[in-house]
Image: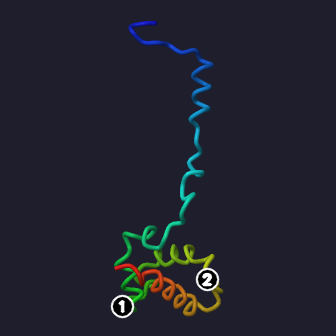
Amino acid sequence: MKNGFVCKGQEEVQKLDFLIHIPYNICVNHYRAMTLTTKFKKDLNTLRAAANKEIFLDVKNPKLYKKLKRYYKDEVNLTGEDPDADYNTIIECIADDLMGVI
Protein backbone atom coordinates (compact mmCIF):
# COMPACT_ATOMS: atom_id res chain seq x y z
CA MET A 1 0.00 0.00 0.00
CA LYS A 2 1.58 3.24 -1.18
CA ASN A 3 0.12 6.65 -0.35
CA GLY A 4 -3.21 5.14 0.61
CA PHE A 5 -3.68 3.26 -2.72
CA VAL A 6 -3.92 -0.50 -3.03
CA CYS A 7 -1.95 -1.96 -5.94
CA LYS A 8 -3.29 -5.08 -7.64
CA GLY A 9 -1.13 -7.72 -9.23
CA GLN A 10 -0.76 -7.77 -13.04
CA GLU A 11 -2.59 -11.13 -13.37
CA GLU A 12 -5.57 -9.89 -11.40
CA VAL A 13 -5.90 -6.78 -13.58
CA GLN A 14 -5.77 -8.91 -16.75
CA LYS A 15 -8.52 -11.21 -15.39
CA LEU A 16 -10.74 -8.22 -14.72
CA ASP A 17 -10.15 -6.90 -18.25
CA PHE A 18 -11.45 -10.16 -19.73
CA LEU A 19 -14.56 -10.12 -17.56
CA ILE A 20 -15.84 -6.75 -18.79
CA HIS A 21 -15.01 -7.13 -22.49
CA ILE A 22 -18.29 -6.84 -24.43
CA PRO A 23 -18.09 -6.47 -28.20
CA TYR A 24 -19.97 -3.43 -29.49
CA ASN A 25 -21.80 -5.27 -32.30
CA ILE A 26 -23.50 -7.75 -29.97
CA CYS A 27 -25.55 -5.05 -28.24
CA VAL A 28 -26.44 -2.78 -31.16
CA ASN A 29 -29.92 -3.36 -32.62
CA HIS A 30 -30.14 -6.79 -31.07
CA TYR A 31 -33.74 -6.48 -29.98
CA ARG A 32 -35.39 -4.24 -32.57
CA ALA A 33 -34.62 -3.07 -36.06
CA MET A 34 -34.43 0.61 -36.87
CA THR A 35 -37.51 2.04 -38.45
CA LEU A 36 -37.53 4.60 -41.21
CA THR A 37 -38.43 7.39 -38.80
CA THR A 38 -35.62 6.56 -36.37
CA LYS A 39 -32.96 5.99 -39.01
CA PHE A 40 -33.79 9.08 -41.07
CA LYS A 41 -35.26 11.34 -38.37
CA LYS A 42 -33.37 14.44 -39.48
CA ASP A 43 -34.65 14.01 -43.05
CA LEU A 44 -38.35 13.49 -42.26
CA ASN A 45 -39.46 16.75 -43.87
CA THR A 46 -37.67 15.83 -47.10
CA LEU A 47 -39.19 12.34 -47.02
CA ARG A 48 -42.68 13.76 -46.48
CA ALA A 49 -42.22 16.15 -49.41
CA ALA A 50 -41.08 13.27 -51.62
CA ALA A 51 -44.02 11.09 -50.53
CA ASN A 52 -46.41 13.95 -51.31
CA LYS A 53 -44.76 14.31 -54.74
CA GLU A 54 -43.67 17.86 -53.99
CA ILE A 55 -40.04 17.11 -54.85
CA PHE A 56 -38.11 14.45 -56.73
CA LEU A 57 -35.89 12.84 -54.15
CA ASP A 58 -33.35 11.47 -56.62
CA VAL A 59 -32.80 14.99 -58.00
CA LYS A 60 -33.09 17.03 -54.79
CA ASN A 61 -31.07 14.73 -52.52
CA PRO A 62 -29.35 11.85 -54.38
CA LYS A 63 -27.30 10.76 -51.35
CA LEU A 64 -30.44 10.29 -49.28
CA TYR A 65 -32.10 8.42 -52.16
CA LYS A 66 -29.12 6.06 -52.36
CA LYS A 67 -29.33 5.41 -48.60
CA LEU A 68 -33.05 4.71 -48.93
CA LYS A 69 -32.41 2.21 -51.73
CA ARG A 70 -30.00 0.37 -49.44
CA TYR A 71 -32.52 0.55 -46.57
CA TYR A 72 -35.31 -1.03 -48.66
CA LYS A 73 -33.20 -3.50 -50.66
CA ASP A 74 -34.34 -6.50 -48.59
CA GLU A 75 -38.03 -5.55 -48.62
CA VAL A 76 -38.59 -4.78 -52.31
CA ASN A 77 -37.20 -6.02 -55.57
CA LEU A 78 -35.31 -3.20 -57.28
CA THR A 79 -34.19 -4.31 -60.74
CA GLY A 80 -32.07 -1.35 -61.73
CA GLU A 81 -33.25 -1.74 -65.32
CA ASP A 82 -36.07 0.79 -65.00
CA PRO A 83 -35.03 3.69 -62.74
CA ASP A 84 -38.53 5.24 -62.82
CA ALA A 85 -40.15 2.03 -61.56
CA ASP A 86 -37.50 1.68 -58.83
CA TYR A 87 -38.05 5.30 -57.78
CA ASN A 88 -41.84 4.85 -57.62
CA THR A 89 -41.41 1.68 -55.55
CA ILE A 90 -39.17 3.48 -53.06
CA ILE A 91 -41.58 6.42 -52.82
CA GLU A 92 -44.51 4.03 -52.19
CA CYS A 93 -42.56 2.36 -49.40
CA ILE A 94 -41.73 5.74 -47.86
CA ALA A 95 -45.38 6.81 -48.04
CA ASP A 96 -46.49 3.56 -46.39
CA ASP A 97 -43.95 3.90 -43.57
CA LEU A 98 -44.78 7.54 -42.97
CA MET A 99 -48.54 6.92 -42.95
CA GLY A 100 -48.71 6.47 -39.16
CA VAL A 101 -46.25 9.27 -38.37
CA ILE A 102 -47.60 12.74 -37.73
Q: Position of residue 21 (x, y in %)?
A: 58, 37
User: Local crowd at mark 2 within 10 Å, few (<14), some, or many (≥20)?
Assistant: few
Taking 101 as reference, is 12 left or right? right
Q: Residue at x 61, y 77 (%)?
A: 73
Looking at the image, residue 62 lies above or below residue 55? above
Q: Position of residue 24 (x, y in %)?
A: 56, 48
Q: Quick one: label 2 or label 1, which is nearer the N terminus? A: 1
Looking at the image, residue 43 lies above or below residue 82? above
* Element type at mark 2: loop
Mark 2 near mark 1, Cβ–Cβ under 8 Å? no
Q: Residue at x 61, y 92 (%)?
A: 82
Give whichever of 72, 96 is nearer the camera: 96
Q: Which residue is mark 1?
A: 54
Look at the image and tell me in which quarter the C terminus lies: bottom left
Label of residue 73 in the image: none
The amino acid type found where label 2 is placed reads: Val
Q: Residue at x 50, y 13 (%)?
A: 7
Looking at the image, residue 25 lies above or below residue 78? above
Taking 90 as reference, is 42 left or right? left
Looking at the image, residue 28 lies above or below residue 33? above
User: Local crowd at mark 1 within 10 Å, few (<14), some, or many (≥20)?
Assistant: few
Of circles 2 and 1, the one toward us is 2
Give whichever of 81, 49 is nearer the camera: 49
Using the numbered discs, state the Cα–Cα distance from disc 2 to disc 1 in whole angstroms.
23 Å
The amino acid type found where label 1 is placed reads: Glu
Q: Quadrant of residue 38?
A: bottom left
Taking 8 as reference, is 79 left or right? right
Q: Quadrant of residue 70?
A: bottom right
Q: Position of residue 69 (x, y in %)?
A: 55, 78
* Element type at mark 1: loop
Q: Which residue is mark 2?
A: 76
Q: Residue at x 64, y 84 (%)?
A: 77
